[in-house]
Amino acid sequence: MVISFTYTMLSAQSDATNEVRFSIEKFIENTEGTADYTDLYDQIENLLKNPININIATFETLLKIPLITPAKANTLIFHRTNYGNFQAIYELQQLEGFDIEYIKLILPFITINEIDNLKTFSKKEFWKNGQHELIAMGACKMERAKGYTLPDSNPNAYQGNPIREVMRYKGIFNNHLQLNITTEKDAGEAINFNRLFLSGGLLLKDMGKLKTLAIGDYQAAFGQGLTFGSGLAFGKSPFVLNMMRTQNGLRTYRSLNENEFLRGIGASVLLHKQIELTAFYSGKKIDGTAASDSAFIGDGFSSLVNTGYHRNINEINKQSQLGRHIIGGHLTSQIKGFEFGFTFTKTFFNQNIIAAQKPYQHYNFNGNRITNMGTDYKWFYKNFVLYGEFSFNEKMKNSSSVNGLLISLGKNLDLSLLHRHYAVSYQSSITNAIGEGSDNRNENGFYAGMSLVPTKGFKLNAYADLYKFNWYRYLVDAPSGGKDILLELQYSKRKSYSWYLRYRSENKQKNEEGTQMLNRMESNERTLWRFHIENIISNTFSLRNRIEYVQYKLQYGKTTRGFLMFQDIIMSPSRKIKVIGRLMYFDVQDYDARLYAYENDMLYSYSVPAFQNRGTRFYILLKYKLKRNIDIWTRFARTAYENISESGNGYDLINGNKVSELKIQVKWTL
């Protein structure tokens, strides 16, 4: 019995790991470039290390478990209320919709054991069993870019070597205290303390009435992220039901974005059994472009810079130029299935931000302070969740809102509806609410998503998002609109064999290409078809295949196409070695028809390059367990183009038809 239970736990952990990989891949597969997803990984890892106690969890807390729908959460609570607490996890098999395969998937995220809530960290048990993780990573492109070949006297010449270096430390004590330290030197940056990105923070959790204390670098997000929300958050994806934000208030920061985080102190305190107050302060310098360096003259800054690069004189001159201070708070209360919150933040800049004078920039922020206030709510009743947030600027101006409904219409059908109204002139310092744009303003939209299980093994996910912009946008000199439609049919057979077929159509308006006396609007439609297969042949050998086709069509102009296909091989020839390899062919006519392909990368990082032109690409990733507590990753990737003799742009331009990159990472755990 012990052996059987242990095997089931290991199998569930493996299934959960695969599900996490699958989830992250689907979330990021349409983003471009290499990104650091430490924040997302930390949220998932925290759930794995701190599983939810299903004997005391509220409806909202249960919805944080991956793959839990409102209907399943309601079924669990109904059974618990009428028949008492669960004595064993596998009692869940008595519940409708909780078969053994489903329980294995959610098993790593749930528990029936009581959660430890320490009153003090002076006790010996707080400091024992500490977990420490140290990661060192280096990456380098073999071919030299233009920026490295310029003379030192050129202000665009890269001052450092082409090696990117990252160091991370994480220490966890009894799951109540976490300490993080992160450093990064980008490729092209000089080895100089002033250019080095250095981040550190401490997070204390669940110490009596003190729910959270954050010191140093941290993230904060409340409600639906419209009034204030920092850090990574899900957007539209094939996980069509995943539109409601379940923000965690204050949390750790371990990512490598050098500007979009908070630095200071924050605390959450339980004032009453059902009332919690959070207050926070952040003060740091961020990168910005001085107005005197722009196309117009003024005292202040014309824009913020989020690249984090400080490789040459021009980039260094923008480093840490603008002081930003944020104070804020959030008060939340829960009463019998209803949760209500109020958020207030005020952002101060030490110099004015001056918007440029182009028509589409007319409503951009001007000044040196922003006030945001908002109310958020969630109502949990039977098989549905009603949620939303209303937000305003100072004196209740520029009202914006986002409201949604998540409902289960049976054990096989779930719906998600969401409406958003973001005012043209709404201003905010940091937000992460759902939207087609990235700044949560000048947008109205309605989203409808459906997840249907027509028969065992099959699932149909679909969404339609209709939106409009009431003011001009970049390259759009009139009010405009668009629609985004996705259909995805999935099939899986006991997690050993799966495939999905995806259709996605995006239609937007923009200025007609070319030079006209009048900028006539035209629609551009991007249609994509994808077929993806994954076959887990054994515990040591798996295959992944994909074929993808896209067509980009302008209403009054060109039609271009793109195509790619790849073969992945995943092998574990021994317990110490894991190998992932890919061979790809692509043929893409231009940038508008570009295609993205997710790639496995170092721990906490994923690469999602955009492909255009014609050529081949391969990469091989090797993970080797040197000792019980030491893991080594090595990754080599190369793209060879058939129809061009140079790649990249600007000062990252590479002369030649090949681009190669080598990465090495070492993780040491104690």
Image: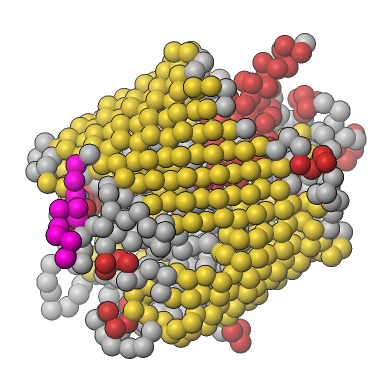
Q: Could you tell me what secondary structure mostly forms the magenta stretch?
A: loop
**Residue 202, position as x, y percentages in the image:** 65, 54
644 or 167: nearer the viewer: 167
Left or right, 172 with respect to 581, comes to right
**Residue 560, position as x, y percentages in the image:** 18, 48
Left or right, 636 with respect to 63, comes to left
10 or 470: nearer the viewer: 10
Mark count: 0
Q: Residue at x 59, y 84 (%)?
A: 394
- Magenta extent: 143-154
Left or right, 604 with respect to 401, comes to left
Query: In the picture shown, does residue 31 fall above or below 274?
Result: above
- State which quarter of the image contains the N terminus: top right
In the picture, residue 277 is in which quadrant?
Answer: bottom right
Query: In the picture shown, does residue 308 fall above or below 63?
Result: below
- State which quarter of the image contains the C terminus: top right
Is 223 part of what is drawn in magenta? no
Query: In the picture shown, does residue 357 fall above or below 122?
Result: below
Q: Residue at x 84, y 58 (%)?
A: 209
**Residue 355, position as x, y percentages in the image:** 36, 82
**Residue 299, position as x, y percentages in the image:** 36, 88
51 or 393: nearer the viewer: 51
Q: Residue furthest front?
A: 192
Query: In the picture shown, does residue 246 fall above or below 517?
Result: above
Q: Residue at x 83, y 49 (%)?
A: 122
Q: Residue at x 70, y 17 (%)?
A: 6
Q: Would residue 587 be visible to someone looking at this image?
A: no
Is 147 part of what is drawn in magenta? yes
